Image: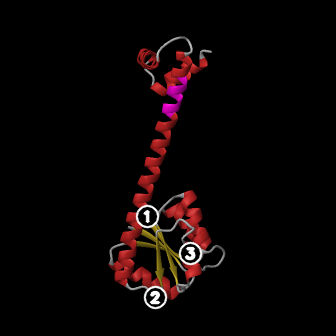
Amino acid sequence: MKILIADDEAIIRMGLKSMLAELGHTVFEATNGREALQIVQHQHPELALLDIQMPYTDGLHVARAIERVRPIPVVILTAFGQKELVDKASEYPIHGYLIKPVQSAELNAALAVATRRFAETRALLAEKARLEQALATRKLIDRAKGRLMESGLTEEEAYQAVQRHARERRISMADAAREILEWQ
């Protein structure tokens, strides 16, 4: 995997880079939040390890920017494990939280969990979008049926009329419903 490490401490970056290289990953390094965002835009990493406290832009704000620009799994790195900080981090689009110093086994597990959670989240978002579209289509077809039923058709006849219009014009049911609604 191509992984971004963003940490202002060189010794931490070197240690993580070494562990990740041993695990077979390609590593990009950033010393602050701005560099991290540039790497995300130009190098297209598949996962980001972000220090929570960095110069210019902290890791949490970088995580939010990554989510908007090019969503990838994000694991936060920190030397601090206070409940307030963990609670604050949970409000951001992150998929893992590691407390320094990090061991190779912990890092590998965090990467696996973050990658899996990210994939699950993306799948849920796609399913949500599909269901919202299906509901919107259903509502549109129901409105078109209602319009046709005003002319005396039964609900079944109205539905069949929408279907027939879609077939004849070789368009989707949603497009057929839109056309029917535009007739009057």
Which residue sits at x=37%, y=81%? 106
Q: Out of 87 and 172, give the one closest to the viewer.
A: 87
Which quadrant of the figure contains the N terminus? bottom left
CA–CA distance in space, label 3 to label 1 = 25 Å
Whole-percent x, y for residue 171 in the image: 45, 22
* Mark closest to the chain's N terminus, 1 or 2: 1
Q: Out of 4 and 162, give the one closest to the viewer.
A: 162
* Mark closest to the chain's N terminus, 3 or 1: 1
- Crowding around mark 3 (Cα neighbors within 10 Å: few <14, some 14 to 19, many 20+) is few
Is label 1 in a helix, a strand or a loop?
Answer: loop
Q: Out of 93 and 13, give the one closest to the viewer.
A: 93
Compared to 2, does 80 lie above or below?
below
Q: Out of 170 and 49, give the one closest to the viewer.
A: 170
Discs 2/3, front? 3
Whole-percent x, y for residue 101 in the image: 46, 88
Which residue sits at x=38%, y=70%? 113
* Mark closest to the chain's N terminus, 2 or 3: 3
CA–CA distance in space, label 1 to label 2 = 23 Å
Residue 184: image quadrant is: top right
Tell me the residue that label 3 is attached to: 87
The label shown at residue 37 is none
The label shown at residue 46 is 1
Residue 168: image quadrant is: top left
